[in-house]
Amino acid sequence: MLRKINCAALLVLVAAWGIASARPSGGTVSGKVTYEGTPAKQKPIDMSKEPSCAAQHPTPITTETVVTGPGNALENVVVYVSAGAPDDSTPPSQPVSIDQKGCQYVPHVVPMVVNQELKVINDDKTSHNIHPLAKINHEWNKSQPPGTPPFTEKFEKPEFIPVKCNIHPWMHSSFAVLKNSHYGVSSGGGGFSIANLPPGKYTLTAWHESYGEQTQEVTISGSETKTVNFVFKAKPY
Amino acid sequence: MNIKKIAKFLFLPTAVLFSIPCLVAGQEMESHLGKLTGHAESGKQLYYRFCWGCHGFRGDGTGENWLPTGNFPTEPYLNIQPRNFDAAVFKCRSTPTGTLPTDQDLYNSVERGFVMSNMPSWISLTKQQRADLVAFIKTFSPRFKNEKPGELINVPAEPKLTLESIKHGQELFQKLECWKCHGQEGRGDGPSASTLTDSNDQPIRPYNFAVGSRFKCGSTNQDLYKIFMTGVDGTPMPSFADVVKPDEAWDLVHYLRTLQVTHKSPELVLWESTKEGSQQVASRRVSGTPTGSGIK
């Protein structure tokens, strides 16, 4: 009996070691996304038709087709490994989420892996309908009145999907459905980082909802950190 | 090269070329409607006679009636874009949002036509012909080969009509904010109505209950139940299947019927028998006729 327990404990240890060593460790790609030129001026949103949302924004918010930061930083750019890495065999177990708050989508861009669960939350005191205008995946459209619990959905194929709420025409978001979990999104300062990249040669693609895509090659050896920067040409319209 | 040699030389490629349709025909698309079986090959003939003028040569909804013409270079002839069959997104289904419709759903759409659009009812065709057309329409998208239709939305038996049911339906109309698009009186003039676009960025109007008795996807109470539980895919109308319980859904159906003030349904008759209901309906009903007679 004791021997059996010992054996089991040993097995557990070996398994734990196996999992720990299998955890991807490797290099990191980080960098900054910037723009050159003059980006389109974002328009203020009139939410007077939805008082419960308007009250949450003392100063009116603007559209988010191009969000910039200091030093020509460009936000909401999804940087992902488009070639060189294998597709994820199983999607990450943690769901990603999108929140409808103050009649805005938070976050504005939601990257996820194929078949990963997406949790849709309505924190507002008004009804929303969440309508991903998918072309490769299936287009669906669901109502979510105030107080209804979050629901989950998933997408089966890689695609950049524009999302809208038909009731509140200013609400727009994008779902970036990717083949693997090696991705990052540029933040307020334009910075992004993709960690745990095993050694290899990769193609990085940077995607922005208004300015399209750019690609760059990067080679990772060992656990180094490589810097890759992207510059998008801003359009004034 | 003599004629025999040329014939031999041409024989193989020609034979291969002609055998391609046979290979394709081996896995021909069918539709199944009760005892009827529709065949895509027969439907094809009908499609290129009756349907392609609007739905287009490739079934993508860009037939010559939709595309801007010489006389009107900027305006399409039709005001609602014909269905694009390669997207396989269909308005009238008995299946959940995002899933494929059943053969019966497609058959019903062909048979019924779409009220307030340019799609007529095709009852002039035989049942077999309509079934054949459904089979052919399914060849435009690979989704019909690779996927099954969604699981049918359960429509429980309709409970007895009561005033409580209508009143609860009225509360739901407020709570679910149907009025945001359809308007408080169901005239399709809610605050969001003017901004609505369909999935092809074409302007689209919410349904106006005050006119007529038919809906886009049928005219019975069961049809009405299905419309808001399945959603009208490709349009702003979402699915309420996750947020409305089946008995509540029937209450909503009963109230929505009272918005059809020109259609004497049992729901409208019962609602008008109450003081509240009769006042509401009277204020919503436009008196008079288009010719002006009868206006007080």
Image (cartoon, coloured by chain):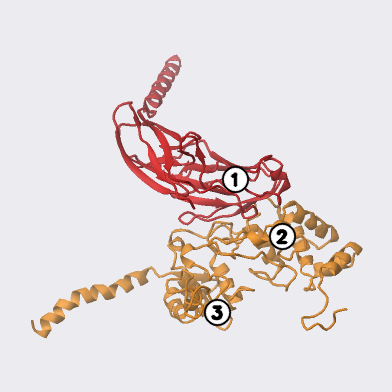
Chain colours: A red, B orange
Q: Chain of mark 2?
A: B
Q: Which residue is mark 2?
A: B190
Q: Is residue A181 visible to the viewer in this orientation of the structure?
A: no
Residues behind callouts 1 and 2 on a single chain: no
Q: Which residue is mark 3?
A: B127
Residue B172: image quadrant is: bottom right
Q: Establish whether labels 3 and 2 are both on one chain.
A: yes
- Above or below, comparing residue A183 to residue B110 in the picture: above
Which of label 1 and label 2 is nearer to you? 1
Residue at disc 3, secondary structure:
helix
Q: Quadrant of residue B227?
A: bottom right
Do discs 1 and 3 belong to a common subunit?
no
Q: Residue furthest left?
A: B1
Question: Mark 1 falls within which chain?
Answer: A
Q: Circle 2 sits in a helix, a strand or a loop, which is it?
A: loop
B40 left or right, relative to B4:
right
Q: Which mark is residue A109?
A: none
Q: Is residue A11 visible?
A: yes
Residue A62: image tag: 1
Q: Position of residue B232 (x, y in %)?
A: 61, 61
Location of residue A128 with respect to A56 vertically, above or below: below
The first of marks 3 and 2 along the sequence is 3
Is residue B3 shown left or right of residue B115? left
Residue A159 in the image: above or below residue B268: above
Numbered disc in front, either 3 or 2:
2
Give whichever of A46, B238 is nearer the camera: A46
Q: Amino acid at mark 3?
A: Lys
